[in-house]
Amino acid sequence: MLHHAHDPVHVRIGNAQLIKLGTKRYDLSDPYHLAITMRWRDFFAASLSLYLLINLAFGILYAVGGHSISNARAGSLLDGFFFSIETLATVGYGFMAPVSLYGHIIASLELVCGLVFTTLFTGLTFVRFSRIKAKIIFAKRAVVARHGGVPTLMLRLAYQRAGSLADAEARMTLLRLHRTDEGEIYRQSYELKLLHSRLALMALSWTLMHEIDADSPLHGLDEETFHASDSRLIVTIRARNHRAGTDVFDLTFLDAEQIAFNRAYQEMYYADDIGHIRLDLQKLDLVQADTGSESIVRS
């Protein structure tokens, strides 16, 4: 169902749902963006629907053209529809063929439409398949624990593929509602300074850390105050997939309730019986009470 410009469009940011007015979910003026951003299920459904509509339209043209197709019943929409499928696919079984000038003109037009449709579908499918997924997984909760004696906001992430990413760069942004003296409410953005915002090689996991010192916008907030602040945490990762020769990007949103105070991540690394270091990604989200011990940044 198409949305008009005045219809509300629901946009989800993390667990929060916003409503946009004056925009459209499906912008038909930019079909390329629409085709490469929709879900695979919707893409194939839309392609199949367009394919059937094209064949139905030409099937009707063949049917109203009288005896324009050999071995086809005059006025038969079904015969015209199946002949359209054969023509659009350039199969040419030979049983049905144009026998009149009208039939030849419609078939020629359909051949051009078939070439355009096949070219566009092939190109769009290639573009969708050629996009490399980042395959970065983020912990479902961030934690606030002591690191080097300083309360530190931490978020753990890991690379799911067998290889590694190069020149990874992370950014962490805090969004918080503010009320002015005039009573106006707006959402302000704060860039949170990370202890290590770049990583030369990301092969395993990475814990992003922001020290909550006197210069931090989180300074002085306890768990109850922070959870009541309606804050959002946005984390973005850019890196280079050197094997595929392309850049990748990923992001995650965390609500205030997803920030656990006085908690620390459980260790994901352990040594097996023969001394090999193993990483258990199933423990990425697991937290425990903060013991005050310093966390180690893994890479």
Image (cartoon, rainbow, N blue to C red):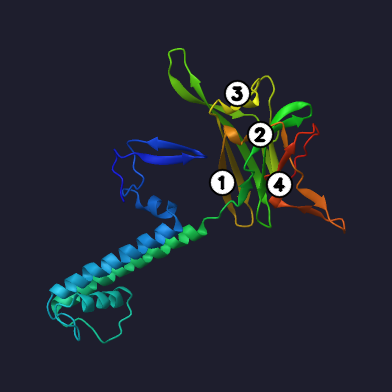
Q: Amino acid at mark 1?
A: Phe
Of the two numbered discs 2 and 4 on the same chain, state the one appearing first in sequence. Answer: 4
Q: Amino acid at mark 3?
A: Thr
Separation of marks 2 and 4 at Cα, in angstroms: 20 Å
Separation of marks 1 and 2 at Cα, in angstroms: 26 Å
The residue at which mark 2 appears reads as: 260
- Rendered image quadrant of residue 250: top right
- Using the image, tell me which numbered label, if any, was put on residue 184: none
The residue at which mark 3 appears reads as: 225
The residue at which mark 1 appears reads as: 249
Separation of marks 3 and 1 at Cα, in angstroms: 32 Å
Q: Amino acid at mark 2?
A: Ala
Determine crowd level at label 3: few under 14, some 14-19, many 20+ residues with C-alpha closer than 10 A.
few
From the viewer's perspective, tell me whether residue 9 is left or right of residue 152.
left
Of the two numbered discs 2 and 3 on the same chain, state the one appearing first in sequence. Answer: 3
Of the two numbered discs 1 and 2 on the same chain, state the one appearing first in sequence. Answer: 1
Up-down relation of residue 18 to residue 67 (above or below): above
Of the two numbered discs 4 and 3 on the same chain, state the one appearing first in sequence. Answer: 4
